[in-house]
Image: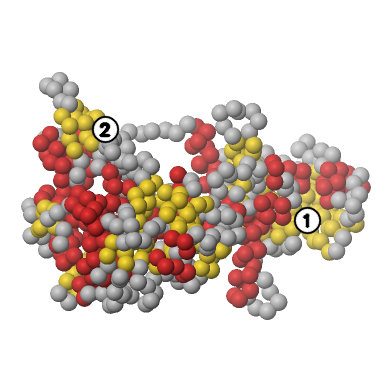
């Protein structure tokens, strides 16, 4: 994810002598990547890429924290002017609480929301935001609306914690009930979109049962702040990130707030954000606190988790010796606390993790990474480790080798490779004539489109052909169809009734689908078998070993990849050249249900003089074949060959 902040805004939190371009260079070496710096009037705008595990850095203050740790490593002064996480506390506004406007909040399931705080403000004066706020929001790509709405966006960019503002008078009966959505429920969001929910989303309803918030995504239009708003509810919260992520996927709705919530936010940042929000509303919107503060926090983060590690471990993993004093300074600058457990023998320390890194730092190696990046990867010696040749197990090497050979060959003869999801829908299973109950069903699927583990590659390949048939209509002449030949090599999954330690049995398959005809697909398979030197290109056995099915003009086949691997030969079986003459005879057959091509071949190869069969032509139900007769012992006559042919 990317954020935009300004240099002047950053300087509100950070005392530094680093220029905007110093910050770009040094942060990019050791922390968030500053992709671009734009001079905009008397300010500079940073476009910063934040890695998904570092949501704590996705704010002005978060970048200030990174600067405090990184810039001194390059000789630049950098120190926080103040710490809003410690300075903005409920006690700051405690004397302003009152009971003029009540607000009742009910959270039906504790796992929906790890912390919920709210305050009611009255006597608001809605007007355009002061230039400081509107200008900074505009530079960061956010449209200025009015002072109240802008303050909510300003808070999110300042501290990285999304904030919601509702019109207090539009929340019926002054009641907010947080619960799981029901399948088919609908909500109209602030951007006037009607969204139908699939169920299990986090929502808030008011005292009359109206949905007023799709939590973590966007508020409802029916509770939005308008020009007539006089009282608001300012609430700040952290949600179950997995449920927010599911709602994003099922609804297709992604907002700046949702991108933050789905990563997992720090519950300890909720309090300072609410307090800072109250300060801004009082200063720029004449807001007055009109309720007691609501703080629902069932599992307070009172005790930091700690990880014990030796200084030797840092040096061993990083590859150089870093002084303990340096390691301590790095951790302290990042907000970690060091508890000395060291003695002359072990030199072990306990590192306490700050609340905003609780979902990011779990093991000793995570601590090593923090020291290495702040110390500077650019300072580490550029030495290659001694080369160690590791061999994979023979079966893995053979799998990779044959799989690559098959892929390159099929691409060479004109097929396109597809890589589909391993999960398919119930509709695809039933459409393919397969049984749903035989498939493994995911217990936590985020969509009905990827609900079952596939037992075959063919349903997906058939869908690939059909989906692309629509697109190729626009690129072909009238009356023609675009030729499509697709393949996929991947695993399929069967319910495991043998092994108790695994719920499924995984099997590699090769699937091929074409929209041409049976003989095209048959030729592809025969060519592949010939390339792999299996049964001389399969020859007369293709309809026995390989099943080709047709569905609405699409021809499909699926082959067990392990069988191809087992039967593969690096070179074909040696066949000595016969020194004797070969007699070629042609014959045309009437094909009937009881007299098929397969039956003809079976009868023909009962003769030990027959070397091979070629198809000459096919017209309607007539099949013309050429038979090659020869002996390895002597020259045979044409009459002897004819007698063999008459037996068919």
Location of the N terminus by quadrant is: bottom left
Residue 234 visible somewhere in the drawing? no
Residue 505: where, in percent of width, then height?
61, 35
Residue 26: where, in percent of width, then height?
17, 55
Does residue 262 sit above or below 310 in this rendering?
below
- Residue underneath mark 1: 615
Side (left or right) of 249 relative to 102: right
Residue 490: where, in percent of width, then height?
57, 46
Decide which of 393, 468 is in the foreground and name it. 468
Side (left or right) of 191 relative to 645: left
Decide which of 562, 424 is in the foreground and name it. 424
Specify the quadrant of the image occupied by residue 60: bottom left
Side (left or right) of 438 relative to 393: right
State which tag comes first along the sequence, 2 or 1. Answer: 2
- Residue underneath mark 2: 307
Q: Report how far apart the C-alphas of labels 2 and 1 lie in the structure.
A: 74 Å
* Residue that extends furthest to the front in the rendered view of this protein: 100
């Amino acid at each position: 994810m990317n954020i935009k902040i300004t240099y002047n805004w950053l300087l509100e939190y950070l005392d530094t002598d680093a220029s905007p371009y110093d910050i770009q260079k040094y942060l990019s070496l050791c922390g968030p990547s500053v992709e671009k710096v734009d001079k905009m009037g008397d300010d500079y705008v940073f476009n910063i890429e934040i890695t998904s595990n570092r949501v704590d850095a996705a704010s002005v203050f978060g970048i200030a924290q990174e600067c405090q740790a990184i810039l001194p490593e390059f000789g630049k002064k950098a120190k926080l002017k103040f710490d809003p996480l410690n300075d903005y506390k409920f006690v700051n506004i405690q004397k302003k609480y009152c009971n003029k406007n009540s607000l009742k909040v009910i959270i039906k399931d504790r796992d929906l929301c790890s912390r919920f705080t709210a305050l009611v403000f009255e006597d608001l004066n809605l007007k355009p935001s002061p230039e400081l706020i509107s200008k900074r929001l505009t530079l960061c790509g956010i449209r200025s609306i009015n002072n109240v709405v802008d303050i909510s966006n300003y808070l999110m960019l300042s501290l990285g914690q999304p904030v919601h503002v509702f019109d207090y008078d539009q929340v019926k009966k002054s009641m907010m009930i947080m619960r799981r959505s029901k399948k088919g429920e609908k909500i109209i969001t602030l951007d006037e979109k009607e969204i139908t929910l699939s169920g299990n989303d986090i929502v808030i309803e008011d005292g009359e049962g109206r949905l007023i918030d799709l939590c973590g995504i966007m508020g409802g239009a029916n509770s939005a702040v308008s020009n007539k708003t006089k009282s608001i509810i300012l609430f700040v919260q952290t949600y179950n990130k997995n449920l927010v992520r599911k709602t994003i996927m099922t609804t297709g709705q992604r907002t700046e707030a949702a991108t933050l919530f789905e990563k997992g936010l720090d519950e300890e940042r909720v309090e300072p954000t609410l307090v800072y929000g109250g300060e801004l509303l009082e200063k720029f919107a004449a807001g007055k606190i009109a309720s007691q503060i609501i703080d629902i926090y069932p599992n307070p983060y009172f005790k930091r988790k700690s990880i014990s590690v030796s200084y030797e471990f840092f040096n061993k993993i990083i590859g150089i010796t870093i002084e303990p004093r340096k390691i301590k300074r790095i951790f302290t600058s990042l907000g970690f606390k060091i508890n000395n457990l060291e003695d002359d023998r072990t030199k072990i320390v306990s590192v306490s993790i700050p609340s905003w890194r609780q979902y990011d730092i779990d093991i000793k190696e995570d601590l090593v990474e923090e020291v290495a990046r702040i110390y500077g990867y650019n300072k580490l010696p550029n030495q290659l480790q001694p080369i160690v040749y590791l061999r994979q197990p023979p079966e893995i090497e053979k799998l990779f080798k044959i799989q690559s050979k098959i892929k390159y060959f099929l691409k060479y003869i004109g097929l396109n490779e597809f890589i589909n999801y391993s999960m398919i829908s119930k509709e695809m299973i039933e459409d393919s004539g397969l049984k749903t109950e035989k498939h493994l069903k995911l217990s936590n699927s985020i969509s009905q489109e990827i609900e079952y583990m596939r037992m075959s590659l063919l349903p997906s390949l058939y869908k690939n052909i059909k989906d692309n048939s629509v697109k190729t209509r626009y690129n072909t002449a009238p009356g023609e169809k675009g030729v499509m030949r697709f393949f996929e090599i991947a695993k399929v999954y069967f319910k495991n009734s043998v092994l108790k330690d695994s719920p499924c049995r995984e099997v590699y398959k090769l699937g091929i689908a074409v929209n041409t005809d049976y003989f095209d697909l048959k030729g592809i398979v025969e060519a592949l078998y010939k390339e792999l030197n299996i049964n001389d290109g399969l020859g007369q056995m293709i309809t026995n070993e390989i099943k080709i099915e047709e569905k609405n003009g699409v021809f499909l086949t699926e082959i067990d990849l392990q069988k191809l691997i087992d039967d593969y030969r690096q070179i074909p079986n040696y066949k000595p050249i016969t020194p004797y003459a070969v007699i070629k005879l042609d014959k045309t057959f009437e094909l009937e249900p009881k007299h098929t091509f397969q039956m003809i071949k079976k009868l023909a190869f009962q003769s030990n003089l027959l070397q091979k069969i070629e198809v000459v032509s096919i017209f309607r139900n007539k099949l013309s074949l050429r038979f090659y007769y020869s002996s390895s012992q002597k020259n045979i006559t044409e009459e002897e060959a004819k007698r063999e042919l008459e037996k068919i």
